[in-house]
Amino acid sequence: MSENPKNQNGEVKQEKSDSNHGGNSSGAQETTRQDSIERIMMRKQKVYQLPRNQKLTKLSMYSSCQANECRCSGWKTPEENRHKDVEVDYCPDFAEECRNPNCKHSLETHIQHLGDITEEQMNELLGAIVDVENLYMSMLRETDTDTKKVYAYLFRLLRQCILTRTQAVIRGPLGDPPFEQPSISKAVTNFVMHKYGHLHQAELDSMTDVAKTFLHCLNHWNFEAPSARQDLVSQEDVSNYKINYTRWLVFCHVPAFCSSLRHFETSVVFGRTLLKAVYQYVYQQLLMRCKIERDRMPPEKRIMLTQLPKFLEALKQEVVNEDSPIWSPNFKPTSSLLLHKTKRQHEGSSLSGTGKKMGDAKRYKKESDCEDLSDDVVARALKRINDSNYSSRAEVVFPPNAPRDEAAKAEENRREIEFHVVGNSLTKPVTKQSMLWLLGLHSVFAHQLPGMPREYISQLVFDPKHKTLALIKEGRPIGGICFRTFVSQGFTEIVFCAVTSSEQVKGYGTHLMNHLKDYSTQRGIKHFLTYADEFAIGYFKKQGFSKDIKVARHVYAGFIKEYEGATLMHCELHPSLIYTQFSSVIRKQKEIVKELITQRQQEVQKVHPGLTCFKEGVRSIPIESIPGLREVGWRPTFRAQRTARPLEESADPDKLANSLSGVLLAVRQHTAAWPFLKPVNQAEVPDYYDHIKYPMDLKTMNERLKNKYYVTRRLFMADMARIFTNCRLYNSPETEYYRCANTLERYFQTKMKEIGLWDK
């Protein structure tokens, strides 16, 4: 540190200290936090207004000496002027020497690389310096070791960014936001629709306001350090909370008062793991604040506080419930809620007299107006195929291939085999039976995987962080899957998978994997990763694994061990499936469909008399008048008549090129086009091309237009659509980039319509 920060920077730490007494949901604590941020902003504005010479002096204290082979990292103030403040009344002569005994170069030598810096760039660096000084004071005053380490890391990062004049980018094992899907914000929105979607519009709006208040409190909450959490019992809970606490500090808390770092909202980047860990404490504190603040608030806010306890209690049940639908990425409101919502929209349109809501209701009616089989029809078909005398199936002649795990399931139903998840532990006693099974599993893995060293197998099988799904037959293990779950990352790594050679080809391997899938989905894990050797790739493919890895590399890199000569494979799990019953359900559905087809054929299998009208001189008849056509399900289709055909491939290619050139120029000059003007820089966004396989930008389109690539308007429209699709794929809907894509797409369509090149 080249300068001892003044005491005026200490307000950041005071804000942190105040908030540690139970979150900052109270008005006084939130005011303290806001006041601290405002004081920091006022100081930055004061620094921005300094004369240029004083600004350069401030920058020199954080700039490396430019003299050859000098390692001085910042100009040192003379001893006699240490009490003076550069931001107030001190501006040394540029010829004055640095008081670092290993440097002694002039002040001008420290700033000679800043001669052509613009005022905007200078203010950006000065703002980072203010952030560094605040971080330094926070680090000095912090008593918690874990928090202090985070402050020190961010301090060094920003200090280095000032030296190199680069943007601060946080990389490492913490990963990139968002850390879990769905986010807390999305889950709370799902909860409101799931729990209160049936209410009238006014009541629903009221509960929505309560949900927004809860999310606002969570976004401004100061969580306890891991060392202060005495309620965390297991080592896994402690580890997970420590990771999430560190992420919260780095991406949410510190950037709130340190604008040089990118700031994220807690409710947007975190999911169930963090909320479940902190909910009990937040719940108690918010209820206490409700009692204290209720009488001080205006009547309209008091109503909201009255509903908050009920909301928190109901949400608590969904947070604890492992099978709660609000955490499903495929969450959709029930049909009754959708109908109720449509009814509200219809009522609103009748009252307002506008056509927009009425149009929404009509559109929903059109989408839901489809023929579906009644429950009675399906029940009759199910009863028919379950009838012991039912013998009309094709399987009587051509029996189908039985599922691979059919025999294993039958043995499990007869209790000839059992499945148990066993593992070692350092915090609680392990039963003798579990330890004997682990020893037996070690022998199975060692015998079936001769390429693996026995010491390595022992290390993982008996590691407390690993568990093994054991297949037990006649009291001894005959197979198993050793795995480790990374809850914070949302995936399970499969380490070993083997079945004793004498018990193979009986479907045990498939049934083992299905049990593990059910075990994982029940705990919210939706991804499997494993390194498979050349002999195991076929097995894993049959279990739904693929070489196409749909998990971002930063999610698993550094967490799982990579094996030389093995292939990384991935399996995505669906939370709604019960994998041990999947094949039976599919077979039952297939039988029901066949029976329904048979019944339908019997109903419509009628012979109608032939048409004789043509013999009588009739040249044509409407197709719908053919007897029996409607009975078999035919319906007339109506095609919208095109009012005009837009300009397609012109006989004059130059005319088309000129039209497209005008559109492209207008799009490039739009205020929302700045993210798409040139290709994404891989140095700035390292993982962009891992996610986006077919990049496109306006600069590339301009070059293609000059090279006469766009011989049809379809090619031009496809490239433009790819720009917006890539943006939405890589960025979340809350980002500025996502909004720019939506705005620019609408503008592009308008320009194309103006010149008659749009017919979608």
Image (cartoon, helix red, strand yellow):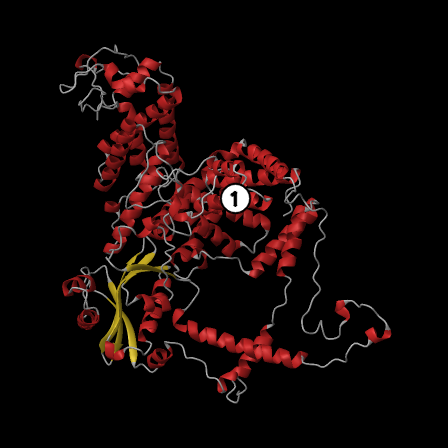
Please state if 86 lies on the left or on the right of 194 as rendered.
left
Residue matched to label 1: 719
In percent of width and height, residue 452 lies at 19, 64
The quarter in which the N terminus is drawn is top left
In percent of width and height, residue 491 lies at 33, 57
Which residue is found at the position 66% from the left and 80% from the top? 603
Q: Is residue 515 visible?
A: yes
Of residues 449 and 387, the one drawn nearer to the viewer in this rendering: 449
Asked which quadrant contains residue 67, the reply is: top left
Secondary structure at badge 1 equals: helix
Q: Amino acid at mark 1?
A: Asp
Asked which quadrant contains residue 630, the reply is: bottom right
Asked which quadrant contains residue 542, the reply is: bottom left
In percent of width and height, residue 103 lies at 16, 19
Q: Residue furthest bottom?
A: 389
In percent of width and height, residue 756 lies at 66, 41
Instruction: Count neighbours of disc 1 (C-alpha within 10 A) and say few if under 14, some if 14 to 19, many if 20 or more.
Output: some
Please state if 172 lies on the left or on the right of 204 as rendered.
left
Q: Is residue 684 above or below residue 627?
A: above
Q: Is residue 288 visible?
A: no
